[in-house]
Image: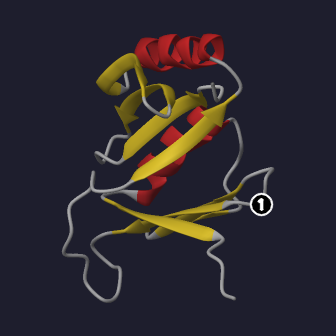
Amino acid sequence: MVHPDFTILFVDNPLASAAFYRDLLAVEPVESSPTFAMFVLSNGVKLGLWSRHTAQPAVTAEAGSVEICYRLENPDDVDSVYSDWAKRGLRILQTPVELDFGYTFVATDPDGHRLRVYARIAAV
């Protein structure tokens, strides 16, 4: 079976996006150039930032049609991250709210990619 281990976001400026994610994730990129940057996170997930102007084949989709999700342990953690990201000036699409799957909020990165933070609701 083939399993994904790498997510690539198509961005306007990989160096600027790398600076954003370096601050947000508190980790240095393992690769950084004007056309591509990559992070390897402590859980093994890889996040690539590829210039939408140089990617092949050409990028035709707009940002915002998928989400990168960050699972936290509890709603208080979600509120803490929300407060931090709001203070950093991230664009907030959805303030913290309880939905059927958990307590969550949604922000965007500078290119409009959706970033969802959530804590699961315990099964009843």
Instruction: Decide: is 53 above or below 75.
Output: below
Identify which residue is drawn at 48% across, 67% down: 8
Q: Residue furthest front?
A: 124
The answer to which of 61 and 71 lies nearer the viewer is: 71
Q: Nearer the viewer, residue 91 or 32?
A: 91
Mark 1 crowd level (few <14, some 14–19, many ≥20, 10 Å Cα): few
Name the image quarter holding the C terminus. top right
Residue 118, given in percent of the width and then of the height, sits at 54, 30
Which residue position holds label 1?
44
Image position of 43 (left or right of 123): right
Image label count: 1
Query: Which quadrant: the N terminus?
Result: bottom right
Seen in the picture, residue 121 relative to 55 is either above or below; the reply is above
* Residue 82 visible at all: yes
Q: In the image, residue 119 lies at what x, y percent?
A: 60, 27
Q: Residue at x 63, y 10 (%)?
A: 76
The residue positioned 79% from the left and 53% from the top of the image is 43
